[in-house]
């Protein structure tokens, strides 16, 4: 995971929120999508039906941007692949990823690597 403070390239909508950009590389096949799910209401509270659908850029890099309230001290998250052709779900391996919004002020970027375990 690479954390980048992107003050020059992003803006916040107010002092009560923090914008976080998420990027993950995952080579999908047709009918697959990558979602971002987590502990925050903004990430669906671990419900993949409410998760944030990511958009794919070049070279299978998936990205999205989420605005979190600064009242949330920490947010846990994971990436999930949904195969719409057969409704299968594949969760990223490993422990939940954790963002400490209290420790990082301003816009953030997380450039993550998909974890198998």
Image (tube, helix red, strand yellow):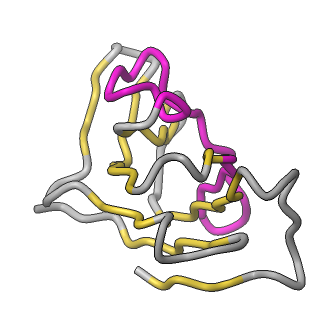
Q: Is residue 5 left or right of residue 73?
A: right
Decide: is 49 above or below 15.
above
Q: Which of 58 and 73 is in front in this view?
A: 73
Q: How far across and how far down the image is residue 33, in percent?
A: 52, 36
Q: Locate residue 22: give its quadrant.
A: bottom right
Residue 53: in magenta span: yes
Coordinates of residue 52 in the picture (x, y in percent): 56, 33
Q: In this view, does 22 lie above or below 78?
A: below
Which residue is more in the foreground, 99 or 57? Answer: 99
Magenta residues?
A: 41-67
Residue 24 lies in the magenta-colored region: no
Residue 73 location, quadrant = bottom left
Q: In this view, does 44 lie to the left or right of 20?
A: left
Q: Is residue 37 above or below residue 3?
A: above
Query: In this rendering, would 9 be left or right of 23?
Result: right
Q: Tell me which residue sits at (44%, 71%) in the image.
A: 112
Image position of 99 (left or right of 11): left
Q: Position of residue 30 (x, y in %)?
A: 54, 35
- Tell me what residue is drawn at x 88 percent, y 65 percent: 11
Vertical relation: 104 (above or below) 47: below
Q: In which quarter of the image is the C terminus?
A: bottom left
Q: Nearer the viewer, residue 33 or 108?
A: 108
On-image quarter of the N terminus: bottom left
At a point 34% along the width and 64% down the height, the residue shown is: 114
**Residue drawn at (22%, 55%) of the image:** 96
Total numbered circles:
0
Residue 69 location in percent, x, y?
62, 45
């Amino acid at each position: 995971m690479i954390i980048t403070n992107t003050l020059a390239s992003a803006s916040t909508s107010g002092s009560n929120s923090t914008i976080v950009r998420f990027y993950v590389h995952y080579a999908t096949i047709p009918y697959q999508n990558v979602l971002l799910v987590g502990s925050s209401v903004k990430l669906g509270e671990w419900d993949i039906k409410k998760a944030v659908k990511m958009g794919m850029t070049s070279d299978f890099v998936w990205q999205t941007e989420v605005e979190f309230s600064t009242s949330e001290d920490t947010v846990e998250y994971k990436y999930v692949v949904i195969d719409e052709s057969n409704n299968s779900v594949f969760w990223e391996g490993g422990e939940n990823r954790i963002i400490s919004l209290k420790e990082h002020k301003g816009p953030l970027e997380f450039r993550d690597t998909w974890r198998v375990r």
